[in-house]
Every structure is written in structure tokens, then in C-alpha cells.
């Protein structure tokens, strides 16, 4: 069981589920003056949305480990269990099952929101993860951008389907409509934050995996342009995150979110620390430490949403 949970990256799945719950209950609802499932997406629809997103993520991890079996023997010896503890045929079958179930759930969510064709977003996401594992991850920067985009997607999906579900109730929709610009701006901040931290994590991972990627012809950014240029790019991304964080602080302060604005000082320091560690990192252990710092920064950003609930 432990090996299976490691295979599907259960901590990452937990973070996805938490981020989606926080987005609805600590950001969207408080800013719109709503409680629970008073309006918009209902409890069943939200549960299906979370399950669909998690299953697509599981499918992505399964197919990624399948395509990375050879590379991971060098980069992560003993950690990739596909072909060892879990037969390849079982992993492939599981990949198709979880994706089919996820897409069906996604179409049910779209149907419940009154926009059934928007269920295609789940087909697109599952397909993008497949193409990432099969092709994009070995293309300089393209694979990194794909994963960074998908890291931010879970925040956007909640608002996307909640918004269209809310349109089914014209009275409530008209009542909360004035708050939509604020919700959009706040969520864009968190989408940008998730995108940049996801991109940073992918760059670090590619540097850590450069040996196996080079041997098997996986042309990632560090393989193509070298570790030094990758570090420079990582520093630029971290400083961009710092600028976004400072702008977000100003916005939150003007919007009356005093504690949230103050909390983002920690986010500022996190991006500064990441830039500094990029400069100092040379051996693999330093990059592993950098990866941990980025994960902590991700969690800090997600949990900062709680402050919105108490400041509205």
C-alpha cells in the first residue's frame, strides 16, 4: 500500500484537494458573501470536480513513471516502481481507467453547471499530461511551462465551474456580480503564484535529473542550455515572483486585507531565499534543499488564503 501511495504521489494529491477547498471556502465564498454551497456549484458537483482533478493527476503520474522508467533508473534509482513492483500492463490499464472515470465525472460537473461541452477541459487536461510525458518534458522549457500551467489550473477550475453554476440562479448572480472583479484579481494573484512556483520546482527538478536526461537524449532546458543558464533563468523567475508578491501586497493593503498583506512579507522572503539558493547551489544536495524550500513556499501561499476568510 505504501508503494502504491508513493506511486500516485499522495502528498501532491492532498495539496491539490486542499487548494481547491481553500479556493472555494476561503476565497470565492467570503468575497461573494456566500456560505458553504449556498449558491454556485453544489456539494456533489464540487466533490466530483475534486475527484476528477485528482484522478487526472494520478493518471499523469502513472503515465509519467511509465515513460520515465529508464531515465529514473539513473536519476531516482529504486524510486520508480513501474516495471518492478507494479507490472507495466497494470500501470497502463490503471492509467486508462482513472482517466476515463475522471473525464466522465468532469462531464457530469459540466452538465450540472449547465455547460456540458465545458467537460472537454478535462479531456484537454488529461491529453496535455499524456503529451507532456510522451513528448513535451524533453523539450526545453515547453514541458516546464506545461506543468506550471497545470499547477495553477486547479485554482481556476473551481472558479470556472462555480461561476457558470451560479449563472443558473439569476437572482443570486445579480446580487454577487459586483464582487466578481475582486474575486478575479485575487484568484489571478494565486494563479500567478502557483504558476511561478511550479515553474521554479520544474527547473530545479530538471537540474537534478540532468545526468539521466543527458544519457537518454531527453533535451530539457539544462541539457540544452546548461546548468548555469538554467540557474540564471530560475533566478529571473524567482525575482519575477518577488515583484508579483510586492504588487499583491499593495493590492491587498488597498483592498483592506491587512493581515494578508503582512503575511506576504514571508512570500517576499521566500522568493528572495530561492534566488539566493539558486546562486549558491552547485551539488545535487543543494538543489534538493532548494526543492524543499519551493514546496514550503507553495504551501505558505495556499494557506495564506485562510486569512481572506477572517478579514472579509
Image (spheres, grey):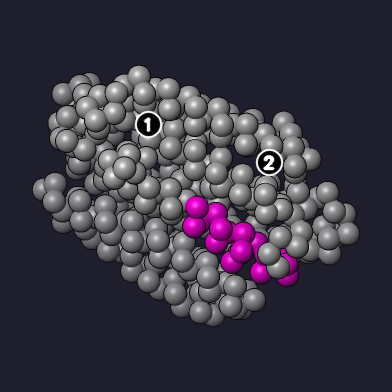
- The residue lying furthest to the right in this view is 171
| SS at circle 2 | helix
Residue positioned 44% across, 74% down in the render: 263
| SS at circle 1 | helix
Residue positioned 38% across, 67% down in the render: 268
Q: Which residues are magenta?
A: 17-34
The residues bearing labels 1 and 2 have C-alpha atoms spaced at a distance of: 24 Å
Quadrant the N terminus occupies? top left
Query: Height in image: 70 above or below 9?
Result: above
Residue 23: in magenta span: yes
Residue positioned 28% across, 34% down in the render: 221
Hey, which quadrant is residue 3 in on the image? top left
User: In the rendered image, which residue does mark 1 sit on?
Assistant: 62
- The residue lying furthest to the left in this view is 283
* Nearer-the-camera pick, 240 or 134: 134
Residue 289 image point, x, y percent: 20, 56
Mark 1 nearby-residue class (10 Å; few <14, some 14–19, many ≥20):
many
Residue 292 image point, x, y percent: 26, 56
Question: Can residue 139 be seen at all in this image of the molecule?
Answer: no
Quadrant the C terminus occupies? bottom right
Residue 10 image point, x, y percent: 37, 47
- Is 295 left, or right, of 308 in this rendering? left
Query: Height in image: 46 above or below 310?
Result: above
Disc assigned to residue 109:
2
Q: Do the CB atoms of the residues marked 1 and 2 lie less than 8 Å apart?
A: no
Amino acid at each position: 500500500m505504501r508503494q502504491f501511495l508513493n506511486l500516485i504521489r499522495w502528498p501532491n494529491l492532498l495539496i491539490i484537494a486542499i487548494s481547491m477547498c481553500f479556493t472555494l471556502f476561503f476565497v470565492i465564498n467570503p468575497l461573494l458573501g456566500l456560505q458553504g454551497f449556498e449558491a454556485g456549484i453544489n456539494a456533489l458537483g464540487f466533490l466530483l470536480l475534486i475527484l476528477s482533478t485528482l484522478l487526472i493527476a494520478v493518471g499523469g503520474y502513472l503515465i509519467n513513471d511509465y515513460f520515465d522508467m529508464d531515465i529514473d533508473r539513473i536519476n531516482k534509482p529504486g524510486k520508480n516502481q513501474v516495471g518492478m513492483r507494479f507490472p507495466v500492463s497494470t500501470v497502463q490499464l490503471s492509467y486508462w481507467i482513472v482517466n476515463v472515470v475522471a473525464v466522465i465525472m468532469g462531464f457530469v460537473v459540466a452538465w450540472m453547471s449547465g455547460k456540458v461541452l465545458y467537460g472537454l477541459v478535462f479531456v484537454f487536461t488529461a491529453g496535455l499530461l499524456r503529451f507532456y510525458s510522451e513528448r513535451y518534458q524533453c523539450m526545453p522549457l515547453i514541458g516546464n511551462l506545461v506543468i506550471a500551467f497545470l499547477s495553477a489550473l486547479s485554482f481556476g477550475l473551481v472558479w470556472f465551474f462555480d461561476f457558470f453554476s451560479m449563472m443558473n440562479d439569476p437572482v443570486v448572480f445579480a446580487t454577487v456580480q459586483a464582487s466578481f472583479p475582486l474575486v478575479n484579481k485575487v484568484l489571478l494573484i494565486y494563479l500567478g503564484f502557483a504558476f511561478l512556483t511550479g515553474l521554479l520546482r520544474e527547473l530545479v527538478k530538471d537540474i537534478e535529473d540532468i545526468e539521466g536526461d543527458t544519457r537518454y537524449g531527453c533535451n530539457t532546458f539544462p541539457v540544452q542550455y546548461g546548468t548555469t543558464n538554467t540557474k540564471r533563468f530560475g533566478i529571473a523567475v524567482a525575482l519575477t515572483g518577488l515583484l508579483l508578491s510586492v504588487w499583491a501586497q499593495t493590492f491587498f493593503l488597498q483592498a483592506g486585507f491587512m493581515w494578508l498583506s503582512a503575511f506576504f512579507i514571508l512570500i517576499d522572503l521566500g522568493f528572495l531565499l530561492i534566488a539566493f539558493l539558486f546562486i549558491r547551489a552547485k551539488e545535487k544536495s543543494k538543489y534538493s534543499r532548494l526543492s524543499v524550500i519551493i514546496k514550503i513556499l507553495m504551501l505558505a501561499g495556499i494557506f495564506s488564503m485562510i486569512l481572506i476568510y477572517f478579514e472579509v
